[in-house]
Image (cartoon, rainbow, N blue to C red):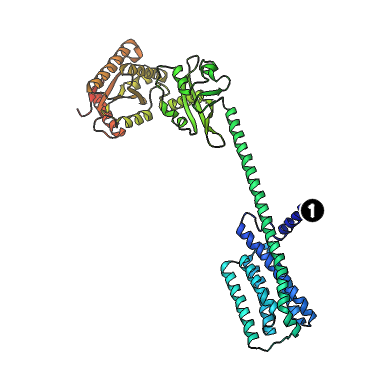
C-alpha cells in the first residue's frame, strides 16, 4: 500500500511539473526533453546550492551569493516554462544562468573552483537531453571552453579575485566527487522515475485506446444490427453461402415456407422460384468473392404473381482470426418506390393526353438509334384540317380526335416502333431497323385508318394527314433527321394533303 502511495505521489509530482495539456505523454521525444529540462534546472540548482554552502563556511560569501542567485533564477524559470512550454526561450535562459555562473566562478577564482568544473559533464548531459541539437552543441562547446579556460588559469597561476584557503582547495575534488555521486544518483533516480511514470501513463493510454476501440467496434456492430432490424427482412448465410437464418415473413413473400429457403443458396432459391428464368449471376459476384455489397436490386414474383423489387445489402462475417464465416444482410421492399419511379419517368417522357411518347423521349431515342445499324426510318405526320375541327366543335372534340389518331398510329406499327406526339396535331414514328417498304406500309395504314375514321364520324369527315418519310442512313443527329422528315411532310401537304412523300423526292 505504501509503495502504491509513493508511486502515486511521484506521478502527481511529475504531473504538476509537466502538465499534460502542455506536455502530452503521447509525444515521447518532447516529453523526454521537457523532463530533462526540469532535471537540468532542479539538478543544476541543487548542485550550485550544495557547492555554495561550503563557500559560506570558508568566507567566500560573494561566490556563494552568486551561486544562490543563479540557482534561484533557474528554479524561478520553471514556473513560466511549465505554463508556456517554450523550450528555446526558457531553456537558453536556464543554461545562461548555469554556465554563466560556472564561467564567472572560474574567472573570479582563477581556475581553482574545481567543484564547478567536475559538475560540467553532468550539466552537459542534461543539456543535450533537454535542448535541440544545435543549441545543445553550442552549450557543450561553452562548457568545454570553460573547462579549458579553468585549466589555463590554474596552469599559469593567473591572479584570482577570491582565493580560498589551502584546506578548501585540497578538499574540493573529493567533496565535489562525493557531491556529484549523491546528486547524480538522485537525478538518475528522478529521471528513471519520470520515464517510468511516462511509461505507466503510455500503458494507461494504450489500454484506454484499446478499450475505446472495443467500444467503438461494439457500437458499430450494434448500429449495423439496428440498421438490419430496421429493414423489412434480414438474412444470414454460412461460409458456403447457404441460408442459415431468415427473418419471419421473408419466405412467405415468395409464397414459400422457411424450410424451402433455409439450407439453400440464394441462387438455388431464385432458380426454384422461376426455373425458366435466366439468373444474372453478375449480381452475386461480390458475394462469391466475400466482399460487402449494398443496394443490390433483386427482381422477383410474389405469391400472387405481382412484381417485387427488393433492395439487398450484405457484409461478410469474419472471426477474430479473419476467417470467413458467411454473410449477414438486410432486405428492403422497394417495389412501390420502383413503381413510382417508373411512373414518374413515364410521365416525364410521355404525352399526358394521348399516352404516346413526347418530343423529349423521341429525341433521346432517335439519338441512340442513329448509332445502330441499320438505323431505320423516321415518319413525321401532320393532321390536315385539324383547326377546322377545333373551331367547329370545340377543343374537347379536338382532343378526342387526337386520342383516336393516337390509337390508329399504335395499330399501324410494330411492337418495337416508337410513336410520339410532337405537340399540337404533329406526330412522329421511329421505325428502328426498318426499310423504305416498311415505312411506306406504315404510312399507307395510317392514311387508311384516318379515312375509315373520317367515314365513320361526322365531326371528323374532312380529316386526313400529310406524312413525310426520311431514311436515317447517313444522318448523325436527331435534329437533322427531324428536319428531313418535316420537310417531306411539308411537301406532302403542298402536294394536296392526304398522302405521304419521301425526303429527297
Residue lying at 45% horizontally and 28% vertically, measured from the top left: 284
Report whether 419 appears left or right of 238.
left
In the picture, which quadrant includes the C terminus?
top left
Q: Is residue 73 visible?
A: no
Residue lying at 74% horizontally and 79% vertically, measured from the top left: 171
Q: Secondary structure at mark 1?
A: helix
Residue nearest the observer in this picture, 230 or 95 = 95
Residue 82: quarter of image: bottom right
Residue nearest the observer in this picture, 330 or 362 = 330
Against 124, residue 431 (above or below) is: above
Pointer 1 residue:
2
Residue lying at 66% horizontally and 54% vertically, measured from the top left: 199
On the image, the x and y values in percent for residue 341 come to 47, 27
Badge 1: few (under 14), some or many (20 or more) residues near its Cα, within 10 Å? few
Report whether 110 appears left or right of 451.
right
Residue 372: quarter of image: top left
On the image, the x and y values in percent for residue 486 come to 28, 29
Amino acid at each position: 500500500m505504501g509503495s502504491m502511495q509513493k508511486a502515486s505521489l511521484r506521478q502527481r509530482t511529475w504531473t504538476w511539473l509537466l502538465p499534460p495539456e502542455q506536455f502530452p505523454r503521447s509525444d515521447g521525444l518532447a516529453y523526454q526533453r521537457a523532463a530533462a529540462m526540469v532535471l537540468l534546472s532542479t539538478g543544476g540548482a541543487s548542485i550550485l546550492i550544495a557547492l555554495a554552502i561550503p563557500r559560506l563556511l570558508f568566507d567566500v560569501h560573494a561566490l556563494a551569493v552568486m551561486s544562490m542567485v543563479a540557482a534561484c533564477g533557474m528554479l524561478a524559470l520553471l514556473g513560466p516554462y511549465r505554463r508556456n512550454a517554450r523550450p528555446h526561450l526558457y531553456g537558453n535562459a536556464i543554461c545562461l544562468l548555469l554556465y554563466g555562473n560556472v564561467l564567472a566562478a572560474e574567472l573570479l577564482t582563477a581556475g581553482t573552483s574545481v567543484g564547478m568544473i567536475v559538475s560540467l559533464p553532468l550539466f552537459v548531459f542534461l543539456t543535450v537531453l533537454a535542448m535541440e541539437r544545435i543549441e545543445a552543441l553550442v552549450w557543450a562547446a561553452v562548457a568545454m571552453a570553460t573547462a579549458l579556460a579553468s585549466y589555463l588559469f590554474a596552469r599559469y597561476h593567473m591572479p584570482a579575485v577570491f582565493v580560498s584557503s589551502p584546506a578548501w582547495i585540497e578538499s574540493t575534488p573529493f567533496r565535489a566527487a562525493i557531491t556529484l555521486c549523491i546528486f547524480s544518483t538522485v537525478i538518475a533516480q528522478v529521471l528513471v522515475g519520470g520515464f517510468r511514470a511516462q511509461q505507466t501513463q503510455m500503458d494507461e493510454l494504450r489500454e484506454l485506446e484499446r478499450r475505446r476501440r472495443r467500444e467503438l467496434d461494439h457500437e458499430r456492430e450494434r448500429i449495423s444490427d439496428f440498421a438490419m432490424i430496421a429493414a423489412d427482412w434480414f438474412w444470414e448465410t454460412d461460409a458456403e453461402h447457404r441460408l442459415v437464418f431468415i427473418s419471419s415473413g421473408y419466405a412467405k413473400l415468395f409464397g414459400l415456407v422457411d424450410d424451402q429457403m433455409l439450407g439453400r443458396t440464394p441462387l438455388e432459391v431464385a432458380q426454384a422460384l422461376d426455373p425458366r428464368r435466366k439468373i444474372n449471376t453478375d449480381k452475386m459476384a461480390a458475394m462469391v468473392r466475400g466482399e460487402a455489397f449494398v443496394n443490390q436490386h433483386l427482381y422477383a414474383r410474389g405469391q400472387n404473381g405481382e412484381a417485387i423489387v427488393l433492395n439487398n445489402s450484405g457484409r461478410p462475417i469474419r472471426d477474430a482470426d479473419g476467417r470467413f464465416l458467411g454473410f449477414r444482410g438486410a432486405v428492403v421492399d422497394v417495389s412501390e418506390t420502383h413503381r413510382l419511379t417508373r411512373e414518374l419517368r413515364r410521365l416525364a417522357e410521355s404525352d399526358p393526353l394521348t399516352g404516346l411518347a413526347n418530343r423529349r423521349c423521341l429525341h433521346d431515342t432517335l439519338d441512340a438509334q442513329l448509332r445502330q445499324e441499320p438505323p431505320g426510318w423516321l415518319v413525321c405526320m401532320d393532321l390536315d384540317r385539324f383547326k377546322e375541327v377545333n373551331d367547329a366543335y370545340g377543343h374537347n372534340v379536338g382532343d378526342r380526335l387526337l386520342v383516336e389518331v393516337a390509337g390508329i398510329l399504335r395499330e399501324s406499327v410494330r411492337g418495337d416502333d416508337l410513336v410520339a406526339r410532337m405537340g399540337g396535331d404533329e406526330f412522329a414514328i421511329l421505325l428502328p431497323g426498318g426499310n423504305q417498304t416498311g415505312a411506306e406500309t406504315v404510312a399507307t395504314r395510317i392514311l387508311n385508318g384516318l379515312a375509315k375514321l373520317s367515314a365513320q364520324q361526322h365531326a371528323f369527315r374532312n380529316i386526313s394527314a400529310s406524312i413525310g418519310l426520311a431514311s436515317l442512313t447517313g444522318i448523325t443527329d436527331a435534329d437533322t433527321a427531324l428536319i428531313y422528315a418535316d420537310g417531306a411532310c411539308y411537301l406532302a401537304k403542298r402536294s394536296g394533303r392526304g398522302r405521304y412523300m419521301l425526303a429527297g423526292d
